[in-house]
Image: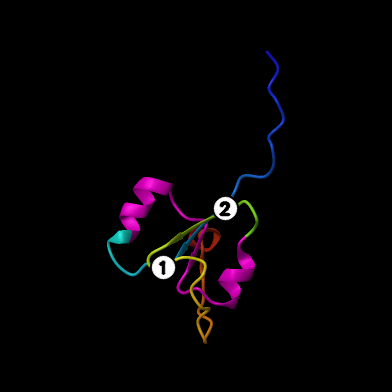
Amino acid sequence: MRMSEPAGPPRCVHYVGFKDDRYWNAVRIFGGPRVIHRRWDWFAVHDVGPDDLVVFAEGDERQPMAAWNATDIDERWLT
């Protein structure tokens, strides 16, 4: 049996704006995030790739960007 080539790189999971227990509900449903964006700011908007999954604590991608950028948490920093 021959394995087929993957369709592309695995998509990245981004969480935006989580501050409470809803984070753990999202982890159970979508798996752990690769990046946690504290708010929907310039960095978050430009960090999301075309096939990435973005999970918002509130709202969606149509919300206005935050006026101030916040530091993001990348899972690579946690190891």
Q: Residues within 10 Å of mark 2 (few under 14, many from 20)?
A: some
Instruction: Give the residue type at disc 1.
Output: Gly
Is residue 45 inside the magenta stretch?
A: yes
Q: Are discs 2 and 1 less than 8 Å apart at CB?
A: no
Q: Which residues are magenta?
A: 23-48
| Location of residue 20 in the rendering, given as x and y in whole percent from the top left corner | 29, 67
Q: Residue at x 59, y 77 (%)?
A: 42
| Location of residue 23 in the rendering, given as x and y in whole percent from the top left corner | 34, 59
Q: Residue at x 62, y 51 (%)?
A: 51
Q: In screen coordinates, is 8 left or right of 45?
A: right
At mark 1, the secondary structure is loop
Is residue 10 inside the magenta stretch?
A: no
Q: Nearer the viewer, mark 2 or mark 1?
A: 1
Asked which colour scheme the image uses, the reply is rainbow
Which residue position holds label 1?
A: 59
Q: Residue at x 54, y 77 (%)?
A: 41
| Location of residue 40 in the rendering, given as x and y in whole percent from the top left corner | 50, 73
- Work out whether residue 14 or residue 60 is closer to the camera in this orientation and state it: 60
Q: Which mark is residue 12?
A: 2
| Location of residue 71 in the rendering, given as x and y in whole percent from the top left corner | 51, 76
Image quarter hosting the N terminus: top right
At mark 2, the secondary structure is loop
49 over 3 or under it: above or below:
below
* Residue that lies at the very extreme toward the bottom in this rendered image: 67
* Residue that lies at the very extreme toward the top in this rendered image: 1
Q: Residues within 10 Å of mark 1 (few under 14, many from 20)?
A: few
- Work out whether residue 20 or residue 52 is closer to the camera in this orientation and state it: 52
Instruction: Give the residue type at disc 2.
Output: Cys
Q: Please tell me which of labels 2 and 1 falls first in the chain.
A: 2
Q: CA distance from mark 2 to mark 1?
A: 20 Å
